[in-house]
Amino acid sequence: MFRILIVDDEAVRVPTLLRYAEILRPDEDIETTHVTTVPENSVFADYDMVFLDHDLGVFGGDVYEVMRRRFFAYEPLGSSPVFIIHSMNPIGAGNLARLLVDYEVPRDRVHVMNYGLINSMVRLRDG
């Protein structure tokens, strides 16, 4: 079972992000969890892949700021899933990627790919 976590305030994106994971892992059964707020850092270790949006709107807040505060409070991630930062905000996505790498998530497990590109890739693949 390949487990993915989608952290995004827009539920309409979930099917596309799930389909992208299916394209990446065609031979895996995929279990998906969608949340609209940043979970505790320890939760990330339960997943193989995490899709992170940078801004979760009025109620979810700025993912970078929430995670930065937690890292400074010494809340480790544990094992590192693959993180795909799918924010349409390139500066916010870059900041979040640097934060993850600065806090010892291996660089090859942190990827920035905005939702527009993921959506285009899925549409091209599925026709």
Image: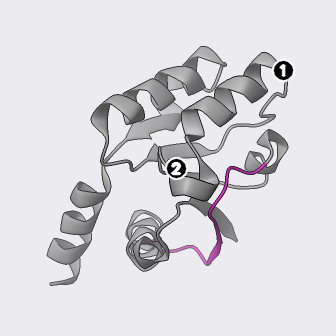
Q: Residue at x 48, y 47 (%)?
A: 55
Q: Is residue 44 left or right of residue 65?
A: right
Location of residue 4 in the rendering, given as x and y in whole percent from the top left corner? 62, 63
Q: Residue at x 81, y 34 (%)?
A: 78
Q: Amino acid at mark 2?
A: Leu
Considering only vertical position in the picture, is 113 above or below 122?
Answer: above
Whether the magenta-drawn stretch holds residue 42 is answered as no
**23 left or right of 38 in image:** left
Q: Quadrant of the N terminus?
A: bottom right
Mark 1–mark 2 distance (CA, rounded to whole Å):
21 Å
- The residues colored magenta run 26-39
| Rendering coords of residue 38 (x, y %) | 68, 50
Q: Residues within 10 Å of mark 1 (few under 14, many from 20)?
A: few
Toward which corner of the image does residue 48 lie, by quadrant?
bottom right
Q: Nearer the viewer's eye, disc 1 or disc 2?
A: 1
Q: What is the quadrant of the C terminus in the image?
A: bottom left
Q: How is the image coloured?
A: one colour
How many labels sit on residues? 2
Q: Quadrant of residue 2?
A: bottom right
Residue behind mark 2:
52
Q: Amino acid at mark 1?
A: Ala
Numbered mark located on residue 21 in the image:
none
In the rendering, at what x and y percent does residue 43 appear?
80, 50
Mark toward the start of the polypeptide (1 vs 2):
2
Residue 27, horizontal then vertical, whole percent: 51, 74
- Residue at 55%, 40% (x, y): give it: 62
Q: Which residue is mark 1?
A: 73
